[in-house]
Image (tube, helix red, strand yellow):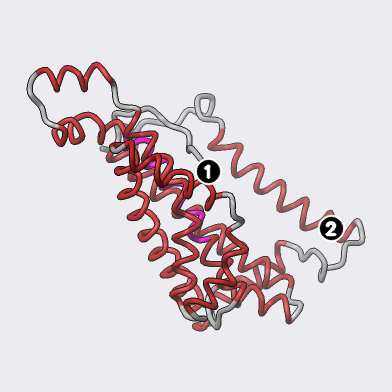
Amino acid sequence: MSKAERPRVDLRVRPELLLVPAVFVIVMLAWEFAAPAFGVDDYVLPRPSQIFGALRTQLSDPLFWNHLKVTLLESLYGFLLGVGAALVLGTAISQVRLIERTFMPYIVAFQTVPKVALAPLFVVWFGFGMTSKVVMAAVISFFPVLVNVIEGLRSADADQIQMLTVFGAGRFEVFRMVRLPSALPFLFAGLDIGIVFAILGAVVGEFIGAKEGLGYLLLQTNYNFDIAGMFAVLVVLSALGLIAHVIIRFAHKRIVFWAEEHRVIGA
């Protein structure tokens, strides 16, 4: 397809394509020049140019990439562990009433416990290495996925289930042909928030006790009163969350292309 044949984007239909970068530029310019004008010291609120300089310095340091790798692995392993547990338990709870009545009170009670309060316990139980951060990431990402799996499996159309049952379909066929497709949009909604929570859980675990990772680096910049460096690490963490969100959304549109959008439940 030649350039002349490519469809043009109508900004009147999608004004966000112009508004999103415009707002970013306006905020950055206002931040850059307004903060010094109002007498805000750089060590309190560094300017974007200083943050960009600190970020560039960090990206050129091989040690920074090691910290980034550690946090990525902790988040990914914890996310996979939390999602796996949520899929198994959520499927069991949605299909077996006795399991729901037995385990749901404990799950809800556990969810009310602030996850940050569990981080010191995980460090004591699993040590200062990667394991405690993986467990923290898994725990904090578990519940949003769990409730979406349960709600999704229960949202299956009753008429479709009845029709398949009349035609002799067994429980597994009903699950595969009706319940699972109905649950996929809810599952991806839970994955979308769960992956962000996994990153948060890994960083919180690194705050409590770690020798590497972006959370550890954030504490180090704080101890050194390197406020621009702290903002730079926060920018990287925000970028990680945004990239993870985009990946989940892309997979959602590719795999569950027929379904309408669903809100995240229990996040």
The image quarter in which residue 43 lies: bottom right
Q: Which circle, 2 or 1, is nearer the viewer?
A: 1
Label 2: how many residues lie within 10 Å, few (<14), some (14-19) or many (20+)?
A: some
- Against 56, is 128 above or below? below
Q: Residue furthest left?
A: 168
Mark 2 or mark 1, earlier in chain:
2
Q: Which residue is mark 2?
A: 35
Q: Which residue is mark 1?
A: 267
Q: Residue at x 48, y 62 (%)?
A: 137
Q: Main secondary structure of the magenta part?
A: helix
Q: Residue at x 47, y 33 (%)?
A: 263
Is 97 or 136 nearer to us in this picture? 97
Q: Residue at x 29, y 40 (%)?
A: 254
| Three-letter code, disc 1 | Ala
Q: Is residue 193 visible?
A: no
Q: Residue at x 77, y 54 (%)?
A: 31
Is 18 or 220 nearer to us in this picture? 220
Element type at marker 2?
A: helix
Indicate yes or no whether the magenta region holds residue 212. Answer: no
Residue 102 placed where, x, y %? Answer: 40, 44
Label 1: how many residues lie within 10 Å, few (<14), some (14-19) or many (20+)?
A: some
Element type at marker 1?
A: loop
Residue 214 placed where, x, y %? Answer: 56, 72
Query: Real-space Cα distance between discs 2 and 1?
Result: 35 Å
- Against 212, is 118 above or below? above
Q: How many marks?
A: 2
| Three-letter code, disc 2 | Ala
Q: Is residue 49 visible?
A: yes
Residue 75 placed where, x, y %? Answer: 45, 64
Magenta highlight range? 183-199
Indicate yes or no whether the magenta region holds residue 195. Answer: yes
